[in-house]
Amino acid sequence: MENLNYVIHPLTQQDEPFLWQMLYEAAHLAEESNLTVQDAMNHPELLKYVENWGLPGDIGFAATLVNSDVSVGAAWLRLFTKNNQGYGYIDDQTPELAIAVLPEYRNQGIGTKLITHLIAAAKVVHPSISLSSRKSNPALRLYQRLGWQIIPGSETVNRVGGISLKMKLDLAAMQEAITN
Ligand SMILES: CC(C)(COP(=O)(O)OP(=O)(O)OC[C@H]1O[C@@H](n2cnc3c(N)ncnc32)[C@H](O)[C@@H]1OP(=O)(O)O)[C@@H](O)C(=O)NCCC(=O)NCCS
């Protein structure tokens, strides 16, 4: 496989259209043949991950190909509240991760790179990062490799009738392990 030449850069408000596309991938809508990006934009539980990107506390990174300036992946965090929870909500202090890489660019380390950047930026601001994932998603292994742990008892039935669960990365503990 040809070596991919890409850069990781912070997301800005200009990246919002790309984030909708990434949400469509992250929420697995792309795997359902009748759904479009517009369905992610119309979905009340999904749109809140991207709508008005650039709110206080939002942190994210995109991977963009150097030669074509085309973005191929993004990982981002947003804080939710008790009254406006994301699928991976734990508490008001813990932002939730969303991530996707375009299908033809998966399994080449881009997701790992994106999350590594996100962790470095988040650990100076947030105590932890949560996420929600389908139990069957191979990405679970990626999350566990990077330090996320499954929250016992967090399993729920998801949009398509499968099982999803919540995971948490303890940034404060990570930071302590580095400094000690
Ligand atoms: C999950 C995802 C962002 C990872 O990005 P990536 O660039 O493929 O990741 P990397 O190459 O750095 O790491 C490979 C790991 O990603 C995961 N992965 C690979 N292909 C995947 C796929 N098609 N779907 C989900 N996860 C995948 C695996 O855990 C793999 O590690 P493993 O081989 O040890 O199991 C990407 O695969 C993706 O967009 N998947 C579909 C959307 C999704 O599931 N998003 C997360 C929702 S919780």
Image: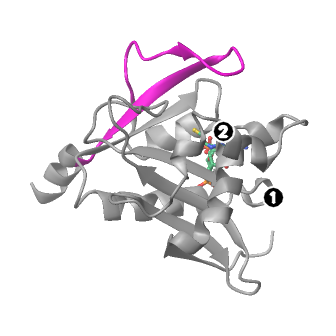
In the displayed structure, does residue 7 sit left or right of residue 153?
Answer: right
Q: Quadrant of residue 83?
A: top left
Quadrant assignment for the C terminus: bottom left
Q: Is residue 40 above or below residue 150?
A: below
Which quadrant of the figure contains the N terminus?
bottom right
Residue at 33%, 64% in the rendered image = 121
Residue, disc 2: 27
What residue lies at 46% left-to-right and 34% top-to-bottom? 86
Q: Mark 2 falls on what kind of element? A: loop
Disc 2 beta carbon < 8 A from ligand 1? yes
* Magenta stretch holds residue 18: no
- Residue 41: x and y in percent read 68, 46
Q: Camera-side residue: 123 or 87?
A: 87
Residue furthest to the bottom in view is 67
Q: Nearer the viewer, mark 1 or mark 2?
A: 2
Q: Amino acid at mark 1?
A: Glu
Q: Considering the numbered disc 1 on the image, is that residue within a helix, a strand or a loop?
A: helix
Q: Is residue 42 above or below residue 91?
A: below
Looking at the image, can residue 30 be seen? yes
Q: Nearer the viewer, residue 18 or 44?
A: 44
Residue 107 in sight in this render: no
Q: Residue at x 42, y 17 (%)?
A: 154
Range of residues picked out in magenta:
150-171
Q: Which circle marks residue 104 in the picture?
A: 1
